[in-house]
Amino acid sequence: MSFLEVKNLNISYPTRKETIVASKDVEFTLERGEILGIVGESGSGKSTIANAIIDLIDPPGEITSGSIKIDNDELRGNEELIQEIRGKKIGFVFQDPQTSLNPLFKIKDQLIETIQTHLNLDYKDALKKSIQLLEEVGIDNAEKRIEDYPHQFSGGMRQRVVIALAISCEPDLIIADEPTTALDVSIQHQILELLKDLTKKRNLGVIIITHDMGVIAETTDKVIVMRHGLIVEQGDTKELLTNPKSNEARSLVISVPPTNKKIDRFKLISPDGKEITSDSKNLTKNIIKTWGVRENKNQKLLDVISITKIFDDQSLVSNFSFGSKNESTEKVVKAVDNVSFELFEGETLGLVGESGSGKSTIAKIITGLVRPTTGEIFYNNLSLYNSKRKYQIDKSRGQVQMIFQDPYSSLNPRFKVRDIISEPIRLFQKNINTSELTQNLYDLIDIVGMSRQSLDRYPHEFSGGQRQRISIARALATRPRLLICDEPTSALDVSIQAQVLNLLKDIQDELHLAMLFISHDLPVIRQMCNRIVVLKNGVVCETKEGEELFNNPEHPYTQELIRLMPKIESII
Amino acid sequence: MLYKTFNKIYDTDIGYSFFNSKIAIISSTILFIIFLCSTFAGLVSPYNPFDPATVSLMDAFTPPSWSEGGSSSFLLGTDQQGRDMLSTIIYGSRISLIVGFASILFAMILGVFLGVTAGYIGGKYEIVVMRITDVQLTIPSILMALLVNGIAKSVISQSMHNDMAIYVLIFAIGISEWPQFARVSRASTLVEKNKEYVSASRIIGLSNILIMFKHILPNILRPLLVIATIGLALAIITESTLSFLGVGVPPTTPSLGTLIRFGNSFLFSGEWWITFFPAIFLIVLALSINLLGDWMRDALNPKLKIR
Amino acid sequence: MIVVAFVSFSLFNFVGDPVNSMTGIDASYERQAEVREILGLNDPVYIQFSRFLGNVIQGDFGISYQLKREVSDLIAERMPATLELVFVSALLAIITGVILGVYTGIHRDSFISNVILVVSLAGVSLPTFIIGIMLIYLFSVILGVLPSFGRGEVVQLGFWATGFLTPSGLKALILPSVTLSLFQMTYVIRLVRAEMMEILQTDYIKFARARGIKRNTINYKHALKNGLIPVITITGINIGTLIAFSIITETVFQWPGMGLLFINAVYFVDIPIMSAYMIMVAFIFVMINFIVDITYYFIDPRIRLKEEAG
């Protein structure tokens, strides 16, 4: 008899049009002291399973059949038992530490309340225990910090508090739903180590849900791969990652960007198991005709010199301060601090850093969305900002374009795809006639690998990956020479990411584009870039050629990043 | 062809919600009827109560046709001057609707323009506009409308009073309602401004005006529609309140509120129908609009999606 | 505040011709010039404004055109009536509103909730004056239980004439305050309900459930505390709206308060009263907003302690 036994679990969401099956015949077990990973792309049903165990599925979803047993006690249908177990035997950790804690209650109150709900302790003892818990999860100065409110903790600290709350009543099972996805790599590493530690010390059973294969490799003992609500493969982690048997698992494993070497293209597996080799050379012939042949002279395209950006941050207090409503407390935030680099034709320069490193701000400065406080930028030897710090858009004339991170907000939902892409074309070629315009549209939609019928549809009819392709088409519409990619695949599933990154590489090769690639994901940067700039808190730590950076990092921060990034190879 | 369009609408979330909500269907039907009646008042109502030739004091105080003393030629009875109630109500509702619609339209255009520009442009402009909005929001609309009305009255010479009264009223109510449009459009604009399609448009080089009104505006229409509907109900109520207080439309073109005022003096002496019917009509009108607005708010709210 | 004072001032001086109103249209030219001199209307604008401000601060609002009495006296007479009415209505609206709002927010689909919602919708759709008339008809005419106009007997406490201390005073208070509070009550109900529903869907509530905290505790401790914050802002705006709607209520019930005074002033274009009323009301609004801001500061820790420590 296992600690946790799930058999034949079926969950569905009846909607007015159809019934969506969130999970079908799911079956697995877990023992104490084991860490189980549930991995799958978005929509695979992994979160649903977790929620089902403690009966927290949002209506109209419901468990239609199956059994969930803990220590041989059946949970399904036993309301009383579930209420008792929640928090006491099973601890849950949600993804977003920002929203998991009630902002109006002190940490102390939230901890003590939880403890007193399940354990028979008086206030003093509960308080003592709470402080101990905070120390156990690694919060320094626990006695003082327990009096604080959630917003006074940083993201990583908050997640530790959440974990403290989850283990407060001595549960035997912890379920963590994407516990580190919202955190930076270094913090992610700490939290995962903490979880591994607690598992050993308290002999817990742990379920970690994630989409990150590196996390799976480094943290879990067993793994379940899910797709469309079904378990496609499960087993010992090392086994599965070295020798995936199902197509889906193979596709997942193979799409993960390698962390230890650079490959030319990401490998892709089609649904029937064969490898896909993309071939867009034919498609680009048309475009090259209209664009004109570009020679790659390797000249310097972009020159960023000593850019600094200071944001004036008016804290909330200013709006509510006694009496004078105009007093502003300025908190100075140096988002970018004296950053300089160069970009040459035809190369891909990577900007890598964690949140707060300033990489996105730099992109915005180059494209004129944000003004630099000091510093200069030259494009093709022309200054992009005049003496009044106003962006001279005519100097770059559509040659600098950008694709963004969030596929769901980068396309205007009220415009048809056709209109989204033709708008920039029309802006730059004012007198273009309809047939030429249509030809342009066809060329662009072909090169990004979408059907011509897509032109007449609306963005919401497409998936995330497809939307990114449309964004790329729009960016190419003005015939840019420099393409800035700001975390273009961070919001996409791993296999889709592989496809889109391959597409970007192809386009760059064929059209001789220079690319500025921004990401926090080191393996992706390694695959995409020739040279890399490492940023931390707005300051350049290191600028090096790609492979040399990974083989011979000099700056301590770079070394730490490389050391801490979750590597799928660690287990193979 | 019609069948196909019907199916297309039914398929959308909003269409489905509409046709499945009895309330929505009933209220919109009621509104539609009222709307038609008042537009074609001349054709629909049995008499023209404001044509002195058709009105005779002899008919005054006739009770409704189903009570004692009533006559079938005056379905709902007559008022103190012999005017047919049904007709006065139809004509009155026309005035109420006109003032309501016009003032909300005015408020919407003014508010949305200021709100969107404030949200997009930001800086000192935004601060100034928002301060004005905040200050005005603390002043309730009735008070605002009263004030504007009062000021206008003293500015415009006595003789022009009656002619200008309706315009003044529309202006007054409009001025009192624009802040909520401004506030909502600004908030929505701020949200949209941070979306990446706006950044993309800026990088392409589109002019700010184009971005504001071609890209952002269509995306913020949903909440605005809800506010407009509920604001319409409020405008109609405000207008009738002002008319009831005697500072609204001139007595020569009475709205429902004025009619209620007329009848109020006779309420206790037994001729209840002179106040009662206009009041019921006003209530039904406001209620239908509010119900529709309520349904709209729930139907257009992405967060409350419970299929 | 200054803005409002200036607007009142401009009203006072530039709108309409005060002299005409005071002396009658037929007065001779010389007489008008005389009055003009006495009123100081010939002085430059800024002197008139500062004189105006000075007067205001001392509580001197000038003399009513129509009633020929000191405006400040008029206001002092009427103020208690309005304030008592507004106070009772506010209390009624907020307390009932919050209770019903919380109930309908937590028990979303129960029959009682739906009934409450429908009634609340009626409250929003019915103009205040109609509610007033209906109530009068029902309780005064048909049932004869409550008075339909006036304040009943009042007891004089210093300069404040209160109706709280007499049975007839209290009786007279019932209908007008119910009328006045109905609109606000429904607004509060809907607001609180919307807030509660949204809060119950947040992550931190879900997390609390996952920790096994009892349903009732979650509803009435966690959700409620978060839900009350917007109610505070609304309360501030509420009082303002109540004062405005009191104008209507006072008219319907012939309640001798500031609102009735104001409405008559508008009708007769009695500028001093109008401008005085505006200033008084603006002052009350500003005070209330100020109090709301301070209350916010004490209730929401996110505003009080803005530092983010590691």
Image (cartoon, coloured by chain):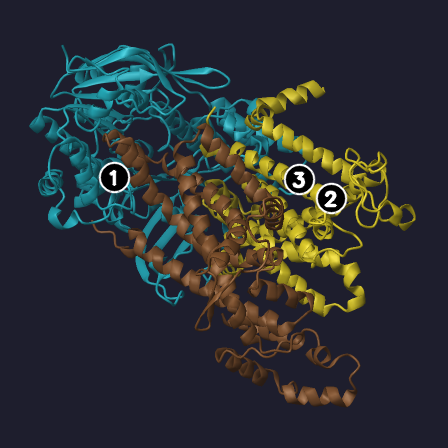
Q: Nearer the viewer, residue B11 or C184?
A: C184
Which residue type does callout 1 highlight? Asp
Q: Position of residue B185 (x, y in %)?
A: 54, 48
Looking at the rendered image, the disc whose residue lies closer to the viewer, 1 or 2, is: 2
Q: Position of residue C141 (x, y in %)?
A: 63, 47
Labels 1 and 3 within one chain: no
Q: Nearer the viewer, residue C144 or A238?
A: C144
Mark 1 belongs to chain: A
Looking at the rendered image, the disc whose residue lies closer to the viewer, 1 or 3, is: 3
Mark 3 belongs to chain: B
Q: CA distance from mark 1 to mark 2?
A: 63 Å
Query: With A516 as the anchor, is A471 left or right in this view?
Result: right
Quadrant (top left/top right/bottom left/bottom right) for the N terminus of chain B:
top right
Residue drawn at x 27%, y 33% is C207
Rendered shade, chain A: cyan
- Which lettered chain is shown in yellow? B
- Which lettered chain is shown in brown? C
Local secondary structure at mark 1? loop
Query: With C75 as the anchor, is C232 left or right in this view?
Result: left
Query: What mark, if any, has residue B285 been given in the picture?
Result: 3
Residue drawn at x 22%, y 38% is A159
Query: What mark, if any, has residue B93 been given in the picture?
Result: 2
Q: Which residue is mark 1?
A: A184
Q: Is residue B301 visible?
A: no
